[in-house]
Image: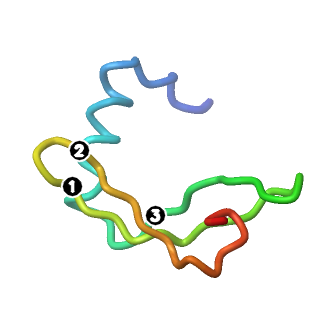
Amino acid sequence: MGPPPPRTGQERLAGTRAMPAREADCRVAAAADGRPHPVPPSFARHDGVVLLATPPAMPSSR
């Protein structure tokens, strides 16, 4: 039994839009000083827009 087939673009978009309703955490890839940094943002969805906020002390927030 192999891996499942890749999701369609519509399936990926639907999963992304549903994420704030089912997830408590998310991670965003960012870079600062030429190095990758995991960013633990807070997020909310409002009027169809995903709002992200992260602490100002994070290297990628500067």
**Residue visible at 38% across and 30% down?**
12
Q: In the rendered structure, which amino acid carries the disc numbered 3?
A: Cys
Sequence-wise, the earlier of marks 1 and 3 is 3
Q: Is residue 62 above or below residue 6?
A: below
Quadrant occupied by the C terminus: bottom right
Q: Are marks 1 and 2 in contact (CB under 8 Å)?
A: yes
Q: Nearer the viewer, residue 7 or 62?
A: 62
**Residue visible at 54% across and 72% down?**
40
Residue 60 relative to residue 32: left or right: left
Residue projecting furthest to the front: 62
Q: Is residue 58 above or below residue 35?
A: below
Instruction: Tell me how many marks there are.
Output: 3
**Residue visible at 68% across and 54% down?**
30
Residue 3 x %, y %? 59, 32
Quadrant occupied by the N terminus: top right
Q: In the rendered structure, which amino acid carries the disc numbered 2?
A: Val
Residue projecting furthest to the right: 34
Q: In the rendered structure, which amino acid carries the disc numbered 1?
A: Arg
Residue 41 x %, y %? 47, 69
Label 1 vs label 2: CA separation?
5 Å
Residue 22 sits in which quadrant? bottom left
Q: Is residue 25 above or below residue 45?
A: below
Which residue has dot 3 on it?
26
Label 2 neighbour load within 10 Å: few <14, some 14-19, many 20+: few
Which residue has dot 2 on it?
49
Sequence-wise, the earlier of marks 3 and 2 is 3
Nearer the observer: mark 1 or 3; the answer is 1
Q: Is residue 31 above or below residue 4?
A: below
Which residue has dot 1 on it?
45
Q: Nearer the viewer, residue 58 or 18?
A: 58
Nearer the observer: mark 3 or 2; the answer is 2
